[in-house]
Image (cartoon, rainbow, N blue to C red):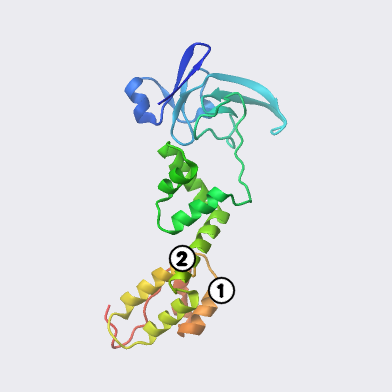
């Protein structure tokens, strides 16, 4: 629970609805803060609970007209679908919050990507890198970052560097896949699935269609076009022959 004193009055911000209900068992709670009236309790975009300290209307150049806005312990924001209220309480709640996605990679984002690439849980990595103690906030912010293409690309590069350090390159994986496909021993399908996992980790396979990857894979393994269709769904089946056992 976070408490801020304004003009001699204490206002509360609860981490989640469960904590809120310990103190307000029957109080109505708005799921959408954009619809809440002044004095009502509402949920933030990351599940925190606050009261609407003020609700008013002002002209907005951004929306070219009059727009409702609300003031809360998480800051001030337009009551618009594109606005967000989440995270840790700002020092100045009277300033409008702005959420922009930067095209640049920060030093903290690089460190987060490296930690995730090394197998660290994304929430734990965010807590360590950004020095916050709010686990719910870290969980949601980590999810937002991991959905961004630039962060996913950075993580893939970090994973590729880690694999390269132990000698697992894309060429190595393709040649290993070819060796298993050509082998006449038993349970090739299980071994091929292990190689598929490594290839996915290296970013070589994805659920998105990639004609260059398919062509390269066909050159190394000799798969037919029909067998390669499995790549589009991220699934590969070992060739069927008399010596294979599933």
Specify the quadrant of the image occupied by residue 65.
top right
- The mark closer to the camera, 2 or 1, is 2
Residue matched to label 1: 211
Specify the quadrant of the image occupied by residue 71.
top right
In the rendered view, would you say 171 is above or below 27?
below
Query: Which corner quadrant holds the N terminus?
Result: top left
Circle 2: element type: helix
Residue 25 in view: no
Which sits earlier in the primary sequence, circle 2 or circle 1?
2
Residue 162's label in the rendered image is 2
Left or right: 190 in relation to 210: left
Task: Report crowding for label 2: few under 14, some 14 to 19, many 20 or more residues within 10 A (C-alpha).
Answer: some
Q: How many marks?
A: 2
Circle 1: element type: helix
Left or right: 121 in relation to 218: left
Farthest top residue in view: 8
Q: Residue at x 40, y 22 (%)?
A: 28
Residue 82: x and y, percent? 59, 37
């Amino acid at each position: 629970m976070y408490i801020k004193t304004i003009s001699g009055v204490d206002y509360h911000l609860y981490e989640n609805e469960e904590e809120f209900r310990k103190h307000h068992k029957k109080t109505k709670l708005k799921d959408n803060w954009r619809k809440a009236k002044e004095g009502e309790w509402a949920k933030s975009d990351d599940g925190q609970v606050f009261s609407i300290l003020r609700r008013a209307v002002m002209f907005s150049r951004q929306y070219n007209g009059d727009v409702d806005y609300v003031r809360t312990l998480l800051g001030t924001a337009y009551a618009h679908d594109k606005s967000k209220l989440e995270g840790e309480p700002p020092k100045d709640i009277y300033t409008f919050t702005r959420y922009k996605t930067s095209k640049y990679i920060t030093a903290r984002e690089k460190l987060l990507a490296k930690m995730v690439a090394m197998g660290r849980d994304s929430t734990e990595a965010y807590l360590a890198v950004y020095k916050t103690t709010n686990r719910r906030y870290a969980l949601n912010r980590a999810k937002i970052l991991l959905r961004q293409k630039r962060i996913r690309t950075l993580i893939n590069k970090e994973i590729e560097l880690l694999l390269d350090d132990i000698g697992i390159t894309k060429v190595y994986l393709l040649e290993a896949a070819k060796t298993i496909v050509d082998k006449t021993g038993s349970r090739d399908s299980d071994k091929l699935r292990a190689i598929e996992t490594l290839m996915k980790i290296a970013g070589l396979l994805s659920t998105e269609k990639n004609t260059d990857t398919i062509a390269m894979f066909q050159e190394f393994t000799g798969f037919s076009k029909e067998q390669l269709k499995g790549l589009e769904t991220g699934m590969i089946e070992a060739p069927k022959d008399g010596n294979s056992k599933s």
